[in-house]
Amino acid sequence: MNRLLIEHTEGLYGRVSIQGAKNSALPILTATLLCDDVCVIENCPNLSDVDVTLDILSSLGAKVFKDRNNVTIDSSRANRHRISKSMMAKMRASILFLGAVASKMGEVELCLPGGCKLGPRPIDWHIEALSKMGLNVSCNCNGKLYCKVEEKFNGAEINLPLPSVGATENIILAAVLAKGKTIINNAAREPEICDLCDFLSKCGAKITGAGENQIEIVGVNKLCGTKHKVIPDRIVATTFLAATAMVGGNVKLENIVSEHIKIIIDILRQIGCTVNATFNTVQILSDKKLKAQGEVITEPYPGFPTDAQALFMAISTVSKGISVFVENIFKNRYKHVDELLKLGANIKALDRIAVVTGVKELRGNCLNAKDLRGAAALVIAAMTAKGSSILTGAEYLDRGYENFESNFKKLGAKIKRI
Ligand code: EPZ
């Protein structure tokens, strides 16, 4: 059941409450491994990537109990340090266990992570940073990494070449129980980094500068348990806004942090939508008569998020005029272009550049999803297209969107899993 039948939809109407953020829940759940007693994580989204993280925690000896969106984790007796290849391969965030397990157990055996194929996704910055903090890494011929720290990580000053989200998170996970001070220069500034640091600070970690480009962590001897509510998912919020902009209608998002999607709101207003925002709600009205966005350049937060690129490319296929996309974060994040062309879009893509000329209408077709956010972009384009479409690869959506089709159905979308 990994295919979706999507039919032309004449507008989306109603309200939707936004789920907890996948890219915040995953590092926070991983970080619970470092705590000496029970953690309760609330507003945790029901996603396949969350299930993988909980499976890895259980395989390391942690006690995990999930009750809908609340997860209780007791890592006090976690005592294993090996993570299976199959679990590592299921998602990118499994690499965060490198810092967490090495910090807790003094050693870790794992292999390269999986995740959406967005071009090469090396972990060199993770390894370089943790090696500078005392991690000894050796690997065998089939890519398994054997890592050890002598006693504990040592604090260090780390200069990241780019504000890598995952590398920033791994360094934080290694530093909170390290000996001495760690400074991360050119740190990622995403809201998910702040949420991870909020959680760890509640557990007793000493972290300053979260959300800035320099983060300082002074290692402590232990971390206690705590209760923490995960922030709302800004990319899921963006998905519903992009869908309404493109398909037309009047939708109100609830339980969000509008500050986290300021740049998205600005662009939606520029292309012709009416957007009313309060601190924790955003309402969008669209008559589908949209202007081209002009230049869309992906940048680290607070710039235009790479995870929204495919969604706004979908919008631009039926906007009046020409839009130029520049994907600066990943080398190959245009796998949705060929699929949008099947719907009748006019797109020319080369390397990191894609030029989109809006067309009057799209027509349904058979589509193949190749990654999480590309899949969502294809769905909203198919809703706008005349006729019906079949999307294969719907399992990608389950990695990042809780109740994807039922939430859209409630807004009037003609979509069902087949
Ligand atoms: C996180 O991926 C997110 N994933 C991605 O969301 C998001 O697109 C990305 O950050 C934005 O930067 C999770 O949080 C689980 P990076 P991550 O390290 O940490 C290069 C989604 O759809 N790089 O910031 O892997 C890398 O190749 C996903 O939810 C190195 O060269 O991203 C990329 O070009 C997709 N060496 C760039 O940096 C390294 O050691 C940014 O990657 C690490 C990264």
Image: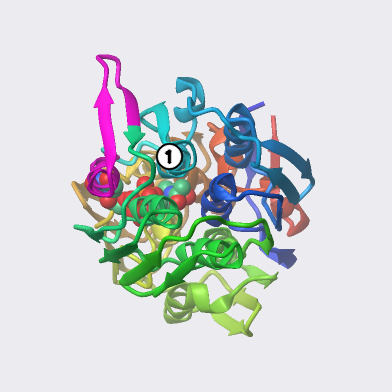
Q: Is residue 123 magenta?
A: yes
Q: Is residue 399 visible?
A: yes
319 relative position to 56: left or right: left
- The residue lying at 50 percent from left, 73 percent from top is 260
Colouring chosen for the image of the structure: rainbow
Residue type of the residue flagged with mark 1: Arg
In the foreground, 358 or 158: 158
Quadrant of the image occupied by residue 46:
top right
Q: Nearer the viewer, residue 12 or 159?
A: 159
Q: Which residues are magenta?
A: 121-147
SS class, disc 1: helix
Residue visible at 68% across and 60% down? 226
**Percent from the top left, x then y, of residue 61?**
63, 30
Q: Which image quadrant for residue 19?
A: bottom right
- Outermost right residue: 67
> What residue is at 39 percent from the left and 54 percent from the top?
178
Residue 404 located within the stretch drawn in magenta? no
Report the residue marked by disc 1: 92
Q: Quadrant of the C terminus?
A: top right
Image location of residue 63, percent across then percent down = 71, 36
